[in-house]
Image: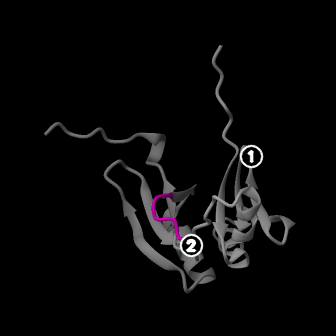
Amino acid sequence: MSSSIPFASIRLITDRIDNLVGFYAEVTGVVPAWATPEFAELRWPGVTLAIASASTVARLGDHLDPTTGNRASIVEFRVEDVDAEVARIQRALPGATWVLPPTTMPWGNRSALLRDPDGTLVNLFSPPAGGRRTPPTAG
């Protein structure tokens, strides 16, 4: 018998927990739940973004090396209106580093990318109206 394991959360590890939690709280509008000064969660139905201080990693074993500035992952948030969210975030976080202005991608999503305080890419996207995507052309 096969069953799937439910997805629960993504945890970001940082040396600047207050900055990172504040950034994601501002971007998402979600109030963080602080378990300790070293660990906070932003919760949505069915998924959690956990943010922990690098000092928490030592509790998992000496063999782990906490890193920040992940360049291999993108944290993504689905929004109704990418352009409106970008304008709101630019007002709220004027020093934010934007990587991609609002752009319609070849697969139909409207996206804008910025970096969080640790350098991780954050994608704000909205799918095409009706969820339809244009299939690629044969070439």
* Left or right for 138, reference 39: left
Measured from the top left, where is residue 105 in percent x and y? Answer: 35, 56
Q: How many marks?
A: 2
Q: In terms of depth relative to the viewer, which is nearer, 80 or 23? A: 23
Marks 2 and 1: CB-CB under 8 Å?
no
Q: Disc 1 designates what residue?
A: 45
The single residue placed furthest to the left in the displayed view is 139
Residue located 57% across and 70% down the image:
68
Category of crowding for the residue at label 1, using alpha-carbon neighbours closer than 10 angstroms: few (below 14), some (14–19), many (at least 20): few
The quarter holding residue 2 reads: top right
Prevalent SS, magenta region = loop
Q: Quadrant of residue 15?
A: bottom right
Along the line of sight, which residue is nearer the eye, 89 or 46?
46
- Residue at image point 66% right, 22% down: 3
19 relative to 74 in the view: left or right: right
Q: Residue furthest bottom?
A: 95
Q: Amino acid at mark 1?
A: Pro
- Residue occupying image coordinates x 71% and y 74%: 17
Scheme by which the image is coloured:
one colour
Q: Nearer the viewer, residue 136 or 75?
A: 75
The magenta segment: 68-73
- Residue 127 position in % (x across, y down): 47, 49
Q: Amino acid at mark 2?
A: Asp
Q: Secondary structure at mark 1?
A: loop
Residue at image mark 2: 116
